[in-house]
Image (spheres, rainbow, N blue to C red):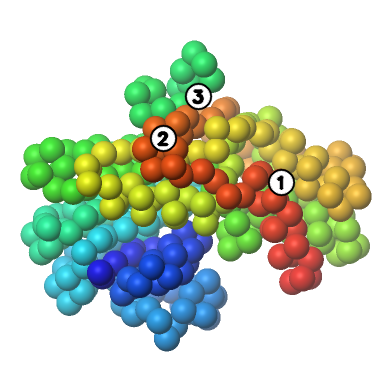
Amino acid sequence: MKAFITGIAGQDGSYLSEYLLEMGYEVHGMIRRQSTPENQESRIAHLESKIKTYYGDVKDRSSIDRILKEVQPDIIYNLAAQSHVRISFDIPQETFQTNAVGVLNMLEAYRGICPNARFYQASSSEMFGNSVDADGYQRITTPMHPVSPYGIAKLAAYNFVSHYRNAYKLHAVNGILFNHESERRASNFVTNKICKAAVMISNGLQKELALGNLDSFRDWGHSYDYVRAIHKIVTNDKAEDFVVATGMTFSVRQLCYIVFDKLGLDYSKHIKQDEKFIRPEELKYLRGDSKPIREKFGWHPQYTFESMIEEMIEYWKDRI
């Protein structure tokens, strides 16, 4: 079985590559060229001899066509994205071109070149915006009213996938993944930003950390757990969409308390709020209902919130 992963050099792409290789898949991936390839491919450098990568871009239809014609994959995992929500306010057009039009490019190429393959789209909890069901959860049926260019683009892509599935009878599915982190997460994302800064502070290398809204709540899981879920979604006999989440929610403030406390520090003495990290329109609360995927596939997270945080702290301890 051949798998093709866009965004293979990212956090999820690297864990997914490892997982698929363990199951005997032939793994191919697309990398968007940057001027510093040493950093760009650091997450998959240890897999260099086991996977095949190609330069391309979801915004460049010709590169997608070229790669799909060569690979002829059995499964396509579209993970490529402009993945930083806060930055999407600064570069809204780039975000929409990549996260919405890029998905349309992928679907058109898939439909024309390898329509018998299966297609997975990395959808996002940001699509819900501030809509929450009465029981405090978000699920497939929750109204979607995104509050960022990132969420808007992801919702457009989500609807494109649903449309192509229904209109052209393709096995195309969405996984609506809530926030997921790991030691491979870039340090400009809030979880790893906090873990790194706390270790720096504990070593006397930094005095304080500037953050945005401390009272926004998120449902945080581990990337490794979530790539196991997306593989179950796309290999399911029926093409249908699922929410992937832990079902627990923590505020950024609680995250700060836990991380700093594990290092014997009082977060309130080191954290300050900075307006530049406040979103123009805030998403206040996310908590996903993953009961359908748990019941159908027996999926459940192996990591707890605390074990995930501990892993990230240990990573920065070793590094720093």
Residue annotated with mark 2: 295
Question: How far across and down, in percent of the image, does residue 175 sit?
Answer: 36, 44
- Taking the image as drawn, is residue 33 in sight? yes
Q: Earlier in the sequence, mark 3 or mark 2?
A: 3
> What quarter of the picture does the N terminus occupy?
bottom left
**Residue 140 shown left or right of residue 205 in the figure:** left
Mark 3 nearby-residue class (10 Å; few <14, some 14–19, many ≥20): some
Q: Residue at x 41, y 28 (%)?
A: 139
- Residue 173 badge: none
On screen, 38 above or below 274?
below
Q: Residue at x 63, y 61 (%)?
A: 183
Of helix, strand and loop, which one carries label 2?
A: helix
Residue annotated with mark 1: 306
Q: Which callout, 1 or 2, points to the residue nearer the camera?
A: 2
Of helix, strand and loop, which one carries label 1?
A: helix
Amino acid on which the number 3 mark rests in the picture = Tyr
Of helix, strand and loop, which one carries label 3?
A: loop
Q: Earlier in the sequence, mark 1 or mark 3?
A: 3
Q: Quadrant of residue 59?
A: bottom left
Q: Which callout, 3 or 2, points to the residue nearer the camera?
A: 2
Amino acid on which the number 1 mark rests in the picture = Glu
Q: Quadrant of residue 162?
A: top left
Q: Nearer the viewer, residue 240 or 23?
A: 23
